[in-house]
Structures are given as structure tokens and as C-alpha cells.
Amino acid sequence: MKSLKLAIIYGFLVWLVPFVVSVIIFPIHDTNRPLFESIMPVAGVSIAVFLSAAYFRKVGKDFVVEGLKLGVLWFVISILIDSLMFFGGPLQMTVPEYTADIGVTYLTIPVITIGTGFLLEKRKSS
């Protein structure tokens, strides 16, 4: 990875920003769950795109490989932090409930970082 430290910091922010958004909008979770479920992926995708762009500014080659590594790292960071909260922590969920409600959404992270890598690789070769 170009910068493991920066990648880890950004990975934490990729988890933190949607978490903060969820805390702020949590009152609508019970009153308008579809709206809550629509806002959360937008928050996650937005921060992942923004931080991917910021991270890739410092990358000069091997964009796809870097995007793969970055996406996997950010995905793992999000799952690990969530596991502290949802499995034995204050917000109880079973693994299947978590996977269906939250976990699958994290797959957008490597899609974004790998996609960014492909775009940058294509731009570089043009």
C-alpha cells in the first residue's frame, strides 16, 4: 500500500462518518425505517468516494491493486469495529441479522475503491 497509516485513518473515517449520521438520524429509524435505510448507504458511499479520491491523489501506479487492497482494508476495518458493537456489545444483533441489515452494504467499499483504481488505470494508459 502506498500509505498504510493514511489508509487505516481513512478506513476508520469510512466507518465513523456513517456511524455518526446513524446516531443523528436514529429517531427516524422506528418512525420511517425506509428513509433511514436509504440515507445510510448514501452516507457510506459518499464518504468512501470522497476518501478514495483523497487517498488516490498520492498513488502513482498500480491503481487497481491499490484499490483492491484499500477496499479490503476498509471493509475489514468496518466489520471489525462493528463486531465490537453488535456482537456482545451494546447493539445486539445476530450475525445473519447484521449481515442482512448492515454487512452487505459494506461491499460497496471495495466496489468504489477498485472502480476508482480501474478508472485511474484507464486514464493513465490513455
Image (cartoon, rainbow, N blue to C red):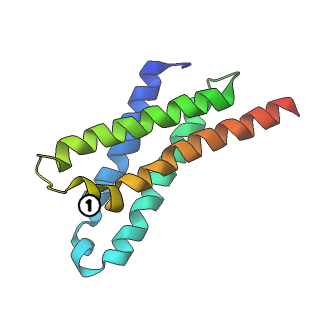
Q: Which residue lies most toward the front here?
A: 96
Residue 97, above or below 2: below
Residue 39, above or below 65: below
Residue 98, above or below 118: below
Q: Secondary structure at mark 1?
A: helix
Badge 1 amino acid? Glu
Residue wearing tag 1: 97
Q: Is residue 30 left or right of residue 39?
A: left
Q: Position of residue 47 (x, y in %)?
A: 47, 47
Question: Which residue does the image show at 36% across and 48% down from the upper left?
Answer: 17
Quadrant position of residue 41: bottom left
Residue 3, above or below 47: above
Q: Position of residue 87 (x, y in %)?
A: 17, 47
Q: Position of residue 83 (x, y in %)?
A: 23, 43
Question: Which residue does the image show at 71% across and 21% down from the upper left?
Answer: 61
2 and 114: which one is in front? Answer: 114
Quadrant in which the N terminus is drawn:
top right
Question: Which residue does the image show at 26% across and 39% down from the upper left?
Answer: 81
Quadrant position of residue 93: bottom left
